[in-house]
Image: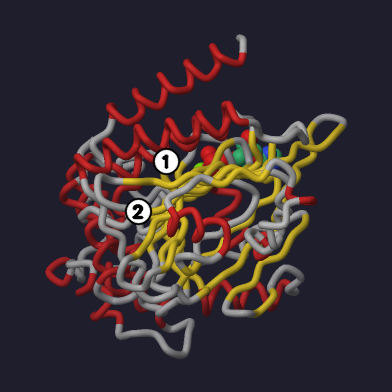
Amino acid sequence: MSETKRFIHATWQIMEALLETDKLEDALSGSLEIIVRTLDSEAGAIWLLDRKTDRLSPMFHIGPADISNITVENGTGIEGIVTKTGKSIMIADAADDPRFDGSVFDDSGLKTRTMICVPLNNVHDVIGCVQIVNKKDGGRYDEEELQLCERMAALAAITVDEKGLIVDLGEKKEVLAVLRNITKDYPSGDGMLQVLKGINLELYKNEFVVVLGESGCGKSTLMNIVGGMDAMTDGTLLVEGKDISHASDAELTAYRREKVGFVFQAYNLMPNLTALENVQLIAELVDHAMPAEEAIEKVRLTDRKDHFPAQLSGGQQQRVSIARAIVKRPALILADEPTAALDYNTGIEVLSVIEDIVRKDGASVMMVTHNSEIAKMADRIVKMRNGRIASIQKNHHPQHAEELVW
Ligand SMILES: Nc1ncnc2c1ncn2[C@@H]1O[C@H](COP(=O)(O)OP(=O)(O)O)[C@@H](O)[C@H]1O
Ligand SMILES: [Mg+2]
């Protein structure tokens, strides 16, 4: 395809992305994905301005690092200047550009070589900016590519005006866990199969993160590493500031017991114990457990607490396993496809319980699913593709479980 054809094609795809969804965030992030792909770039972000704090934060980003928690003061840095002035900035070559102070992506370890940053407008004012960084082939961005970005931003503006967008960054999120360059290899035939290819991700306290991706992309592997059930090949995992990448087996056992609550697709309940006894069994393992009755109450099973697993429906059994996860008051709850074996209605009941433990009880949950509808509940959606994080999207307007349809 010629350059011009490629750009016309991209513009067309962007228009489709904007028209296809009535969720503004999805429309914007879909557009950025197309731009980053078309311009074969290393990273990209959509920064939105919070008027209350006059700071920008990335609503959606693609690239090797998790920049979710970074905020930039309006008027400072490349993103801030573009947002404040409403004028695009193109840095053809950062090495000899005096406007560039080299600090933009410093936290992420991504060194900017070349960059385009264009304002995102609605009718009256600038609401943020769109930024793309580093061509993969090592080349520089050019005027035509700048125009493509401006066209995308202008298209997006139409959608912004129709659908509105209010950004409230709230408090800066407290970091719970940091995953740095985590890889996982499995021996395969003569060589090695790399299942995780360098995962960089932060998890925050009282946050609901959904990891979304096709079957086989590495979601469960990632989850098991974060939960201390599987060893990484390389990389670093910090939980509450403590490095557990090189923990001994005994330390890992303690970590799993004290810090992590697990919910799997299979309920794994003890068949000869009642719902309440299944929860009590776990409560006895740790020092600061909540009373088992309280955990049962939180999953709305008080009237079934003396039933055995075989006397409970799939959804009810899954709620017992959620009670078992929360009774320990873990720092982090990991849920791997918890509704995959359930029908729609019981699936929603289970998700509604998970919603409660995040929104009412302040739990931190990382949930894996291949169902993109479920991602709408999340505070942040981490998309995985082929062992990598493809993108991270903040969801400023999470939906209730009852609102989901699939
Ligand atoms: N123990 C293992 N040995 C070899 N390959 C594995 C092992 N576990 C997982 N894999 C491979 O790793 C890839 C990712 O698996 P997984 O993390 O379970 O994906 P997901 O949960 O996204 O479906 C798959 O290709 C799978 O076959
Ligand atoms: Mg899986």
Question: x and y percent of residue 206 in the render?
Answer: 38, 72
Which numbered disc, 2 or 1, marks the residue closer to the eye?
Answer: 2
- Cα–Cα span, label 2 and label 1: 15 Å
In this rendered view, identify the residue nearer to me: 172 or 158. Answer: 158
Q: State how the image is colored.
A: secondary structure
Question: x and y percent of residue 406 in the render?
Answer: 24, 35
- The kind of residue tagged 2 is Ile
Q: Which quadrant holds the N terminus?
A: top right
Q: Quadrant of residue 209?
A: bottom left
Question: x and y percent of residue 53 in the render?
Answer: 36, 73
Contact, CB < 8 Å: mark 2 with mark 1? Answer: no
Instruction: Give the residue drawn at x 22%, y 42%.
Output: 161
**Which label is found at residue 353?**
none
Instruction: Give the residue drawn at x 39%, y 62%.
Output: 270
Q: Is residue 207 above or below residue 374?
A: below
- For residue 264, say whether it is visible: no
For label 2, the crowd category at 10 Å Cα-Cα, with few meaning under 14, some 14 to 19 and many 20 or more, is many
Secondary structure type for disc 1: helix
* Residue that mark 1 sits on: 29
Question: x and y percent of residue 271 in the render?
Answer: 35, 59
**Which label is found at residue 127?**
2
In this rendered view, identify the residue nearer to me: 11 or 58. Answer: 11
Q: Is residue 302 above or below residue 193?
A: below
Instruction: Give the residue drawn at x 68%, y 57%.
Output: 100
Instruction: Give the residue drawn at x 54%, y 48%.
Output: 220
- The kind of residue tagged 1 is Ser
N-terminal label among 2 and 1: 1
Secondary structure type for disc 2: strand
In this rendered view, identify the residue nearer to me: 153 or 88. Answer: 88
